[in-house]
Amino acid sequence: MNEWLRSTLPIVGSEHARDIDTFYFFVFYLSLFFFIIVGGLAVYFPIKYRLKPGETRRSAHITDNFFLEMLWTVVPSLLCFVLFFWGFNTYLAAFTVPNDAMEIYVRGRKWNWTFEYPDGMAGGGTLYVPLNRPIKLIMDSEDVLHAFYIPAMRIKQDVIPGRYVYMTFTPTVKGEFQIFCAEYCGKDHSGMLAMLKVMDDAEYEVFKREGPPEYKTMDPKLIGETIYKTRGCQSCHSLDGTKGDGPSFKGIWGKTEQFADGTSGVVDENYIRQSVLEPQAKVVKGFEPVMPTFQGSLRPVEINGIIAFIKGQK
Amino acid sequence: MADVLHHQIHAASDHREVDYLSDGRGIRDWLYTVDHKRIGVMYLFFIILSFFVGGMLALAIRLELLYPGRTIMDAETYNRVFTLHGAVMVFLFIIPSIPAALGNFVLPLMLGAKDVAFPKLNLASFYIYCLGATMMIGAIISGGVDTGWTFYTPYSTSTNGAVTLTAMGVFTLGFSSIFTGINFIATIHKLRAPGMGWFEMPLFVWGIYSTSVIQVLATPVIGITMVLLGLERAFGIGIFDPRIGGDPVLFQHFFWFYSHPAVYIMILPGMAIISEVIPTFSHRTIFGYRGIAFSSVAIALVSFIVWGHHMFTSGQSQLINAVFSFLTFLVGIPSGIKVFNWVATMYKGRITLKAPMLFAISFLLLFTIGGLTGLFLGSLSIDIHLHDTYFVVAHFHYVMMGGTVIAFLAGLHYWWPKMFGRMYNERLAAISCALIFVGFNTTFLTQFVLGSRGMPRRYYNYLDQFQQLHMYSTFGSWILGAGFFLMAGYLLASLRGPKNAPMDPWGGTTLEWQTQSPPITHNFHDVPVLKHAPYDYRNIPQGEA
């Protein structure tokens, strides 16, 4: 029974998840106990007291019983107090942030999540965290309500536009865990997924330096595309030639551009790198100097990815 | 035992008098009627029609979820379909179902009254219901709505589609609900038969009374919320959308301030029916009359202060979460008392397992599961995990469908002979009840496991690991559908036969069984005088089975 019951809950990723499961088991067995009593009698009485052929319909006249009625008022009330306090205590524990928590900023939008780490790096799709280190997620939304839900940690929090909310967890198991959006947000609500990857300290140091381990095997173009989609490039730079707040990437590679200061130059590796790190240096004529710098928030491998991606936009 | 004067009983059983169904057969006789029984029957027709529409949408949802990805429709259609399923079932079916259809028919009869206190208001309520329903159908035709039945902002203020028209439909339907509530409160206070004090009223009346109080006090809040939503969409007045200065969580407070009490608008009348059916078919007095009566009132009062338990993850303060969790456990106690009392009523009874009783026993089993799974969700830390998953979907279906709908079916089968003067096929009714019970559990027990494993609700697509359980759930929905189609068949078939139902086919003790089936237009020839409390079987001649 316990084995089966455990299989009805997601894998355990933290001590808190284990505590919740213990509590869940308690509520389950308590409910089962009451269901067997009520359901059992609801089936047994109609069989036992069924009107048999030849019997008269005269029944017992029992209008009430003070002791019984008090019993099933007081006992459930006391049990409910127990459930309330247990639930409240574990809830407070789940939302109390340890002092040394690592803060990661989470942003939800239709229909993806992005994560900004304390060192200024950022990414989407997968949230990377070190093992056994308390994590505090500071979250908000760009558009409508979303909810950040990590079943393995047994925690969930609605993400609201125009307001910061937080949640916290301390992963104690290495591995990859599913993240869902749990608040309905429109067409691709069910596709608004992400992964949580819990790494040991050595792996995490490598991640901080070189980025996600997948980068090693990924096509640089694909790295660039991920950055383009998740870091805000797409809101100003189109891929189909439409003029936005910045030049479209369509056919821009190798083009000679006129700059606002009167000079001109070819769009090549150096120009793209400079534009990402010092965007105000050479602004294409006809555009406002509004692009923010990505100095310190993109790794070299990611800038190379962007270059490869733009190269491919014919 | 409640009793009409004796010579009238004999007069009624010797030859059938013109009943309310035969008293004027023209279409105008129906459309302009102020007879509570005819209004109840018209409500019943549209409510069953709404249930059919909502049910077909449910079957479409389950079919789509048979496999991950696209099965029969795309994501945008799916979002519209589940929104409509929820909105139709809640606003057009379940809220008016028992009070407006069965309550309208039975309540004045139970009180020994000729009609409700305000018959014209009653008819107005019906036409307002039709108007509101038309607006919602208009919204479906003009593009549909994809917000979910909860209309959460700012999604609902920014999405395309006929949100404003739907919101106005809900606003309009609210008036229908309020009118019914006012009418019933006045009727119960003023039109009880001589000798019927508050504690001689049938428990159905207590349940409907509590429901009416909630309808009158809570419904205006959803009305004004829908108006504010419409104003924000139409004129850009910043109430809920943070981009123009609003607060999206405020909407949730407003919405649930109505919609949680509305849950009790749905379940209290169901409990009211069970309180009639169980003593009648146990041929025994109800156990703990006062306990059941007062628990209805207690539920009605406490239901107003638990709305925040829908919002444990919304970002409201942790202190508020704790308070709402505590109050939520409090509201569970009176429901528990009722269940124990119903079970105790069967003890040492003489039980006949006719169709209404079979549904009542189904109700006891399913509602108990619905109530007990509420303990998981009321517990703060567990709810953080289960909120917005299929666990919640399964829980409220056990309460709303396993509870209210099954009780509605118990009531429908209980009063069908009274309403239409015909008996239905008992054997088919038992088969239908079994199909619905098995189908329902197959559909929704699986969803508890889906939810506890982390499957979020309102998902068009899902991970492969959930496929097997989704498949079982879909199979269950087909069994469930078969049960309902069978029921439609034998109930409609019964209408073709002669009016052969006796005055009191089940041995009921309340006043509606003391007049002809179907009743005459004015219900009783003379004002009936109550001589005994309801459910008192001691003075009824008890023949052999």
Image (cartoon, coloured by chain):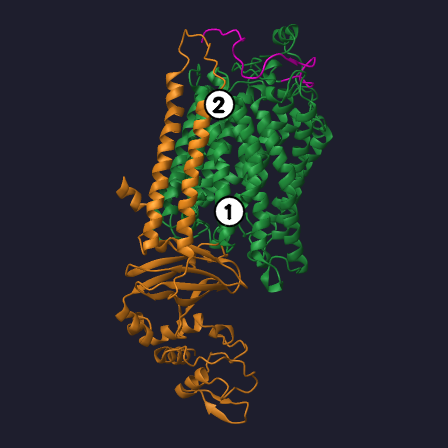
Q: Which residue is label 2 attached to?
A: B356
Main secondary structure type of the part rendered in magenta:
loop
Quadrant in which the N terminus of chain B is drawn? top right
Q: Which chain is the one coloured orange?
A: A
* Drawn side of residue B133 relative to residue A151, left or right: right
Q: Nearer the viewer, mark 1 or mark 2?
A: 1
Q: Which chain is the one coloured green?
A: B
* Drawn side of residue A25 relative to residue B405, left or right: left
Q: Position of residue B506 (x, y in %)?
A: 51, 15
Q: Is residue A5 magenta?
A: no
Q: Which residue is label 1 attached to?
A: B323
Q: Is residue B526 magenta?
A: yes
Label 2 crowding class (10 Å Cα cut-off): few <14, some 14-19, many 20+?
many
Secondary structure category for the residue under label 1: helix
- Viewer-proximal residue, B106 or B35? B106
Which amino acid type is shown beneath numbered disc 1?
Val
- Viewer-proximal residue, B59 or B123? B123
The quarter holding residue A270 reads bottom left
Residue that appears at 29% across and 61% down:
A175
Q: Position of residue B351 (x, y in %)?
A: 44, 16
Label 1 crowding class (10 Å Cα cut-off): few <14, some 14-19, many 20+?
some
Residue that appears at 45% across and 9% down:
B545
The quarter holding residue B189 reads top right
- Viewer-proximal residue, A85 or B261? A85
- Residue range highlighted in magenta: B519-545
**Which of the labelled discs sits on residue A169, or is there none?**
none
The quarter holding residue A98 reads bottom left
